[in-house]
Amino acid sequence: MIDADDKYTDATAAQMLAGAQGGFALGRFVGTFIMKFVRPRWVFLVYLAMCIVFVAPSITHGGNPGIALLFVTLFFESIIFPTIVALGMRGLGKHSKRGSGWIVGAVCGGAVVPPILGVAADSRDSTQFGMVVPLCFFLAAFSYAICVNFVPSYRDTADAFTETKVGIDNVGAKDVETGSPGVLGEKGFESGDAATHDEVREIGKA
């Protein structure tokens, strides 16, 4: 709702933020559910593409239409970062700890994007013009979505892993290749995929 002076009050802005965060949370639950049936890399590709599709028109649309576009953008942005972390760690083996540290440590969007967005908005005296900044970052991230879906060296690594069961119901499980107890065999490790077993074995050496 817009006041008579065509500006949002602080209370209204707070409500909008709460609504946007609700959409973000909903998007994460929906994305996680879809990943049970569709490869995560495909969900990642579609969600990130939708971020670009909806944030782009917000550059020229203000008021309620612009807010609505940002709500939808946040819905699709929800699964982006955790999916990048999960896909980026595939195939690192004994380097998983270091690799995950680099990925998480490289996160700087919250510190970098708002100041740049502010500068862009002030340059045109238009807040919606500032949305060109997150659009650029989404486009940069989309390069990884393309690689992990269509470049064999990325795609094959992401697809080489399947479900692994860890639990007391698998006590005494054997290595599917050698027949010997797995690295976590006595604690309930079972893997139907040799690549996954090798991955866990390498992590155990780290």
Image: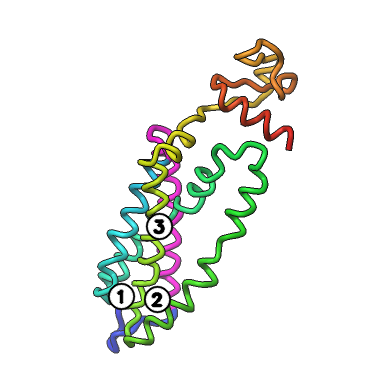
**Which mark is on residue 12?**
2
Disc 1 marks a residue whose amino acid type is Met
The magenta region covers 11-40
What secondary structure characterizes most of the magenta part? helix
Vertical comparison of 150 with 199: above or below: below
* Disc 2 + disc 1, Cβ < 8 Å: yes
Q: Quadrant of the C terminus?
A: top right
Residue 16 belongs to magenta span: yes
Q: CA distance from mark 3 to mark 2?
A: 17 Å
Identify the residue shown where x is 65% and y is 18%: 170
Left or right, 109 with respect to 77, comes to: right
Vertical comparison of 68 with 117: above or below: above
- Mark closer to the chain start, 2 or 1: 1
Disc 2 marks a residue whose amino acid type is Thr
Residue 154, picture quadrant: top left
Label 1: element kind: loop
Front residue of 133/33: it is: 133
Tally of numbered discs: 3
What is the x, y in percent for residue 99?
62, 48
Disc 3 marks a residue whose amino acid type is Gly
Front residue of 11/165: it is: 165
**Which mark is on residue 1?**
1
**Which residue sits furthest top?**
179
* Disc 3 + disc 2, Cβ < 8 Å: no
What is the x, y in percent for residue 182?
69, 20
Residue under label 3: 23
What is the x, y in percent for residue 13?
41, 75
Front residue of 190/13: it is: 190
Identify the residue shown where x is 43% and y is 57%: 24
